[in-house]
Image (cartoon, grey):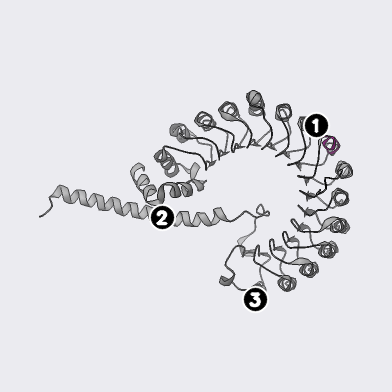
Amino acid sequence: MKMGNSQISKSKRKKSKRERVNKVKSLLTDFVSKYDRFLTVPTPLYSKYSYPASSYVDLSYTIRDEILYPRDLIMEMIDKTILDLWNRNLETEDAVMLSKNTTLTSLYLRQNNIKDEGTVALAKSLSLKSLYLGYNSIGPKGVEALANNTSLTTLFLDQNSIGPIGGAALTRNTTLTTIVVDNNSIGPKSLALIIDNTSLISLSADDNNDYREDVTSLCEAVARNTTLTSLNLGTNNIGNKDVTILTLNTALIELDLSTNDITDKGAIELARNITLKSLYLESNRIKNAGMIALSKTTTLTSLNLSNNWIDHKRVTEVCEGFSKNTSLKILDLSYNYIGNEGAVTLALTTSLISLFLRNCLIENKGFNALIRNNTLLSLDLCYNDIKNMNSGDLLKNRTLTYLDLPSNTFSHTGDLILLIMRRNIILKNMSIVKILSKVIGVEMLSMIIITYV
């Protein structure tokens, strides 16, 4: 039986739609596959540094058999100055070979097995300016050799075993300006010696007080230092009395005191400081009074108060202080009780450009208020209870460039897809596409896009 013209036309339309679906499906599958690679690879500690493509070779997180073995690679590195070999299972002999290269200025060897012997070899290099040796089973012997190097200015030794002896050895070096020694069991006395090194500009020494020793001498060293501008003393048993000493320092611009024992009293002391620009107080015991004091700061531009103790009875008062603050640009209140009431109040801000509110018990009302804000550029609302969005308000928003929404339970999937495809704001956060493709499948996702766009 022959089909009529209307049946033929209908068949062609179905075929055309199927072709469009297949094309979108192919594009989405390819896109999700590519994006998944970047989403699942951890961001290295040094990710804030960027380099010209012509001088940078990144071989981290690649299949070892697919590239040249480092011994061969080094011979090819004539015009390269930066090499990333993060997590490549390198051993001492590889470090010895790398030390013979005379063109490298920056070398990333995080999460390998270089050990002391390899570190001693690398310490002899006269071309290296930046060396990243986190997670490499390095002890005092390796650090002693590094302390004698006269070319290095940046040294990362986080997650090793340098201890008090290795920490004290670093004080001899006079060329280093940036040191990272997180989680090395150095202890407060040796840390104080490192801080007395006047060549240092930036020091990160998170989690180095295993036995909860008194940190008075450490804080006094900070108080008298006039060269450090960035300091991380997170997880070092610092309490309110120690904060009082730390605030005597007038040179610091960035201070991280996360995961310590600071309460409202210490927060109020810090709020009086007029030189700090960035302050990180995540995972302390700060309640409403401390937060209200910090909300009135006129000098801080970045503040992290995530995972503290906001009392839900005064959440509006706390959030009102932050919404009226005119100096803060970046604020993190994640893992506190904010709720719809706090979110609506924070949405009134006219100064904040980046706001983090992960796991804050925010629902639709709070979300819809926040997306009506016209100054925020970045908004993180992961792990809340947002089920429906006001797509009209989001479409009208012309300022957001980053919106993070994973682990919410949207019911209007079509509206979300429409926004993804029509507005650039959510395209900056491709994790939404990935999550949707897994929840409803690429096939259904393709059909929705064809229907809505």
**Would you place residue 300 above or below residue 25 in this image?**
above
Mark 1 residue crowding within 10 angstroms, few (<14) / some (14–19) / many (20+): some
Instruction: Give the left or right position of residue 261, taking residue 368 as reference.
Output: right
Dominant SS of magenta comes to: helix
Let me know if residue 437 is in the magenta part: no
Picture quarter containing residue 109? bottom right
Instruction: Give the left or right position of residue 42, taking residue 170 as reference.
Output: left
Residue at point 63%, 24% (across, down):
316
**Would you place residue 149 above or below residue 4 in this image?**
below
Mark 2 residue crowding within 10 angstroms, few (<14) / some (14–19) / many (20+): some
Residue at point 73%, 26% (across, down):
289
**Front-lying residue, 23 or 164:** 164
Picture quarter containing residue 402? top right
Look at mark 1 in the image and give the residue it sits on.
Answer: 269
Look at mark 2 in the image and give the residue it sits on.
Answer: 27
Q: Is residue 331 visible?
A: yes
- Residues drawn in magenta: 240-246
The earlier-in-sequence mark between 1 and 3 is: 3
Residue at point 81%, 56% (across, down):
176
Q: Is residue 127 visible?
A: no
**Front-lying residue, 73 or 311:** 311
The kind of residue on which mark 3 rests is Asp
Give percent across and percent down for residue 257.
Answer: 76, 41
**Nearer the viewer's eye, disc 1 or disc 2?**
1
The kind of residue on which mark 2 rests is Leu
Look at mark 3 in the image and give the residue it sits on.
Answer: 72
Give percent across and percent down for residue 446.
Answer: 37, 49
The kind of residue on which mark 1 rests is Glu
Q: Secondary structure at mark 2?
A: helix
Give percent across and percent down for residue 350.
Answer: 60, 29
The earlier-in-sequence mark between 1 and 2 is: 2
